[in-house]
Amino acid sequence: MLGVERILSINTVGSLKEYIEPGRFFIPQDFIEFTKSRPSTYYDGENNKVMHIDLSEPYCPEVVSILRDILDRRGYPYSEGVYICTEGPRFETKAEIKFYRSLGDVVGMTGYPEVALARELGLCYSSLCTVTNYAAGISKDRLTVDEVFDVVKKMEEKLVNTVEDFIEHPHTREKSCQCAEIPKYCTVK
Ligand SMILES: [Zn+2]
């Protein structure tokens, strides 16, 4: 309704890999979701309409490359990989983390279904994650919410700088990606 064309989502994640240290940024290249009760489509069968949206490249490659450019120029360390989305709000068990670790690189609760909903609407979507902790069983200590908020606080300035750079970036408003076209090729039945 506002005419938004691109979304930069900010998400907090736990690391599933030792080398993805708390205090780094993370840019998802792909995701796997284990959510249970979240509406994840605008085509919910009403009027018999269903959309099978293509998510073979869920995050806008142009927005991702703008983010890389900003983080490189700022010298902020970041990693890329697969985002695992859980339902929450509880943290994961050690057994769950062992399983997720075999599938992905970070775990969070807020990165889905927005990514799929944005694609249905033809909006560019990318996520900038702050790595705030190691997931259960990867860190030695018990995970606390204070620990997460401490790191969020420490990363706040870098995060604000990155978002401001994103808004000002010369390529943010120049679109040559396919995000807006994909829904046109996906079947609505
Ligand atoms: Zn795009």
Image: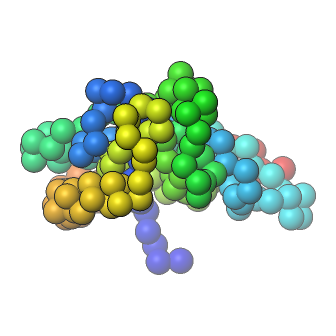
Please tell me whether residue 64 is drawn above or below residue 175 in the rendered image: above
Question: Is 16 left, or right, of 103 in this rendering?
Answer: left
- What percent of the width, then of the height, locates residue 111? 51, 51
Question: Is 157 left, or right, of 88 in this rendering?
Answer: left
Colour style of the rendered protein structure: rainbow
- What percent of the width, then of the height, locates residue 141? 38, 40
Residue at image position (71%, 60%) is 39
- Is 162 or 125 nearer to us in this picture? 162
Q: Is residue 147 visible?
A: yes
Please tell me whether residue 59 is drawn above or below residue 101 in the rendered image: below
Residue at image position (48%, 38%) is 136
- Is 165 or 137 nearer to us in this picture? 137
- Residue 69, quarter of picture: top left
- What percent of the width, then of the height, locates residue 172? 27, 56
Question: Is 93 left, or right, of 178 in this rendering?
Answer: right
- Is 25 or 47 nearer to us in this picture? 25
Residue at image position (54%, 49%) is 91
Query: Quick one: which residue is furthest to the top in this view?
Result: 102
Residue at image position (26%, 54%) is 151
